[in-house]
Image (spheres, grey):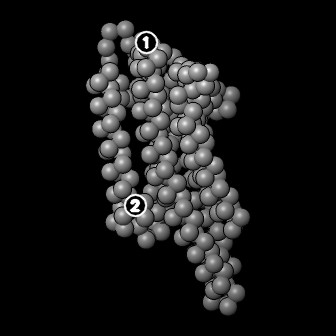
Amino acid sequence: MIIRRTRRALSIVCLSAALAACSTSGGQVTRANSGDAEKDLRRMSAALQRTVIEGALAGAVVGPGFYYRRTVRPANVAAAAATGATLGAAAGYYVGWVQQEYATEEDRLERLKTDLDRNSAEIQGTINVMREVLAQQDRELAAIRARAASGAADSGAVAAEVAEAQANLGEMQKAIDGASRRQEEFGAARGLVPAGGGSAIDPELRQLSNQIAAMRSIATDLAENL
């Protein structure tokens, strides 16, 4: 138990340091060049396609009785979560894995909180990039439209900028979809750590809901400017 807590504390420190680095002018999150921001958006959107159970399995140590590591491959989990018809499959695998590997409520809670901390940091980094891309797209759309209005640019240039913004909007939606799938996984695992009729991870789940709402708000703002 002490080892797990130590690992969790170290992971939180590392994630905090990574986010702090990203928030500086030389980091990956707040660079001034729009191409870099858009590249970061594509990278982070792709990363959010990995479900919680994929991350858990990828980082797990194979040992005696580790049933889920031997029978559930991350690629299969990703495929199962790819369509709405099987969206609950990844959530079921995650719950089963936590139940299999962590016998006590305390250990399960520790695992869930570790995964929630990591997920929160990753999504917050994505939100930061989404906000940067939104601001840059707003500036670029306003500039090209002003040039078109003055006769300095034609309709084709405007259409090209709109197409670029639409592509970025698509990446934002992919990120939102990935975060929503993770929300389902964590929601399914809520019952593993009951505490007084509620759940000890409710604050983290509310934070996740708020983060997804923020992502949707950013995407809506960009869509309204197209």
Tag 2, which secondary structure?
loop
Binning the other alpha carbons within 10 Å of mark 2 as few (below 14), some (14 to 19) or many (20 upward) gives: some
Q: In this image, 39 relative to 142: left or right? A: left
- Quarter of the image that includes the C terminus: bottom right
Tag 1, which secondary structure?
loop
Q: At label 2, which amino acid type do we have? A: Ser
Residue in view at x 50 percent, y 34 percent: 51
Checking the image for residue 23, the label placed there is: 2
Q: Nearer the viewer, residue 104 or 161?
A: 104
Q: At label 1, which amino acid type do we have? A: Ala
Checking the image for residue 103, the label placed there is: 1
User: Can you see residue 68?
Assistant: no
Q: In this image, 131 relative to 107: left or right? A: right
Residue 120 image position (x, y, % from top left)? 48, 43
Q: Nearer the viewer, residue 4 or 21?
A: 4
**In 3D space, how far apart are the residues under numbered discs 1 and 2 (Cα atoms)?**
39 Å
Instruction: Find the residue positioned furthest to the front.
Output: 196
Residue in view at x 45 percent, y 32 percent: 113
Residue in view at x 61 percent, y 25 percent: 198
Q: Earlier in the sequence, mark 1 or mark 2?
A: 2
Residue 222 image position (x, y, % from top left)? 65, 63
Q: Is residue 184 above or below residue 42?
A: above
Residue 28 image position (x, y, % from top left)? 39, 59
Q: In this image, 100 relative to 140: left or right? A: left
User: Can you see residue 201?
Assistant: yes
